[in-house]
């Protein structure tokens, strides 16, 4: 089903300090992080991944193309001689445990979603896609991979890559988030052919990078029809059965609701289909701990999430099979109606706050955080009116929505860690 191929990547010259050259993917970089990457090293990938205007009226896309070409000419970037699948592992600590997620970097034929070879799970925004389209048009390259999942219970591909890579690691460093990155190119023709053949039977689910995949499909169709190289997009592929694959929650912080009144919101919620319970304990920290325990104990047939408002914590719950949810999600799949984020968006944000899909997408009312501490601090600072605290979306929920041909609300999943930019570059020329 999926056309996955090895590629000869552009990579940084091994004499350069790789830990100073890589950056996070463009969509999670704040302006302050962008500036920090600029200061970190004159050849940092930020100048290609998310360049800034360094002079008035500068076309940042053409500037990136010029830098990309200059780095090739100067030997800062070198092209690998042989096509490879690049075995890539990320070791990190979460909740006190050391976890390692391993997959491989490859090229995926970008053919949109109609063929069924690639399944999305999340909505996209036109502005982000246009930005990436202009970058591809100017540079004819992918500087950061999308992140895809496939299901192979036997893990034959994982085993073949591990055996072929052996103990030789070309790149090994720790980033600013204390994530250890290791890259091992696999070039043995027999292994590459075996993996390519096995991937042809797989369906790929986009975990992260919907904007980039849709942009690549448009690019292949409009800008370079018939071009073999331009028909492919760089992707990092991870087996659903990899023990290091985890999804973290994405909490919502809400602001800019005209005439907002916390007491009125609680009254509305208390009268609605959700069960509202104030968490009372000896102090605020104990209340938070009790809320998190309540959320963690949710059974598979119920949605439980938290609300932080005016210094107090509340638990809200509802049965996933509630007819109210069926009514509110008419036109969507059963898998979609049972998502925690769907409950939050339909029964709290839309019903009680007037924040529908268009308002949520505008960026005016919602911000997101994977850390409860940050969400709470944002409310305590007065910048936000309240926060909604969520359990993580399960991988099987993502797959159920994708297989149903549906899409989740934006920011429904947070796969951690992000796939870093700067290890490999896919040349579309």
Image (spheres, rainbow, N blue to C red):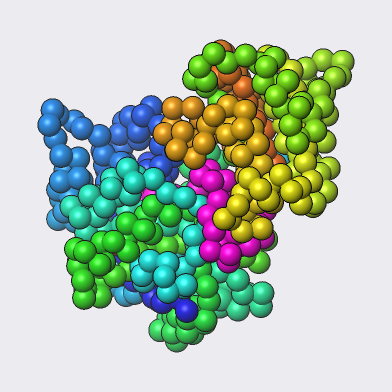
Nearest the viewer among 43 and 348 is 348
Which corner quadrant of the image does residue 9 belong to? bottom left
Q: Is residue 231 above or below residue 26?
A: below
Where does residue 411 sit, x and y in percent of width and height? Answer: 53, 43
- Residue 170 screen position, x and y as percent: 43, 61
Residue projecting furthest to the left: 57
Left/right placement of residue 298 relative to residue 120 reads right
Q: Is residue 177 visible?
A: yes
- Report the residue at 28% width, 45% height from top: 131
- Residue 377 position by quadrant: top right
Residue 118 part of the magenta segment: no
| Relative height, residue 77 to residue 57 (above, below) | below
Q: Which residues are magenta?
A: 394-423
Viewer-proximal residue, 257 or 422? 257
Residue with the most extreme right position:
282
Q: Nearer the viewer, residue 344 or 148?
A: 344
Q: Residue at x 58, y 27 (%)?
A: 353
Magenta highlight: main SS: loop
Residue 148 in the image, given as x and y percentages of width and height: 50, 62
In the figure, residue 36 lies in which quadrant? top left
Residue 40 in view: no
Number of numbered tags placed on the structure image: 0
Taking the magenta stretch, the answer to whether it contains residue 405 is yes
| Residue at 54 percent of width and 13 percent of height | 259
Point out residue 394 in the picture as x, y percentages from the top left corner: 67, 53
Which residue shows up at 37% across the image and 55% down it? 212
Q: Quadrant of the C terminus?
A: bottom left
* In the rendered image, the vertical position of residue 22 relative to residue 9, given as above or below: above
In this rendering, position of residue 413 left or right of residue 426:
right
């Amino acid at each position: 089903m999926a056309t996955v191929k090895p590629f000869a990547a552009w990579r940084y010259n091994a004499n350069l300090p790789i830990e100073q050259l890589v950056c996070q993917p463009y969509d999670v970089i704040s302006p302050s992080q962008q500036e920090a990457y600029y200061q970190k090293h004159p050849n940092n990938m930020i100048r290609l991944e998310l360049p800034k205007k360094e002079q008035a009226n500068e076309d940042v896309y053409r500037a990136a193309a010029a830098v990309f070409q200059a780095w090739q000419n100067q030997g800062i970037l070198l092209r690998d001689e042989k096509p490879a699948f690049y075995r890539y592992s990320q070791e990190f600590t979460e909740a006190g445990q050391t976890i390692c997620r391993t997959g491989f970097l490859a090229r995926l034929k970008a053919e949109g979603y109609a063929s069924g070879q690639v399944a999305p799970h999340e909505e996209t925004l036109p502005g982000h896609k246009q930005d990436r389209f202009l970058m591809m048009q100017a540079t004819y390259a992918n500087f950061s991979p999308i992140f895809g999942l496939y299901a192979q219970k036997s893990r034959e591909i994982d085993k073949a890559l591990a055996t072929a890579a052996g103990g030789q690691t070309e790149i090994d460093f720790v980033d600013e988030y204390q994530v250890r990155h290791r890259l091992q190119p696999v070039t043995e023709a027999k292994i590459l052919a075996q993996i390519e053949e096995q991937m042809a039977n797989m369906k790929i689910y986009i975990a992260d990078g919907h904007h980039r995949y849709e942009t690549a499909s448009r690019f292949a169709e409009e800008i370079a029809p018939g071009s073999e190289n331009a028909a492919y997009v760089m992707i990092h592929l991870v087996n659903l059965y990899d023990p290091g694959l985890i999804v973290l929650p994405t909490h919502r912080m809400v602001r800019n609701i005209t005439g907002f009144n916390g007491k009125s919101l609680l009254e509305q919620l208390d009268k609605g289909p959700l069960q509202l319970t104030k968490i009372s304990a000896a102090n605020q920290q104990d209340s938070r701990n009790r809320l998190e325990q309540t959320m963690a104990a949710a059974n598979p047939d119920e949605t439980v999430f938290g609300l932080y408002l005016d210094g107090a914590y509340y638990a809200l719950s509802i049965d996933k099979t509630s007819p109210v949810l069926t009514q509110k999600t008419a036109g969507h799949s059963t898998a979609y109606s049972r998502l925690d984020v769907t409950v939050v968006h339909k029964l709290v944000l839309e019903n009680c706050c007037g924040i529908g899909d268009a308002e949520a997408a505008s960026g005016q009312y919602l911000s997101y955080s994977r850390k409860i501490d940050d969400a709470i601090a944002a409310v305590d600072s007065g910048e936000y009116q309240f926060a909604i605290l969520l359990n993580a979306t399960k991988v099987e929920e993502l797959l159920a929505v994708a297989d149903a041909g549906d899409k989740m609300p934006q920011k429904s999943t947070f796969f951690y860690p992000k796939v870093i930019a700067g290890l490999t570059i896919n040349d579309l020329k």
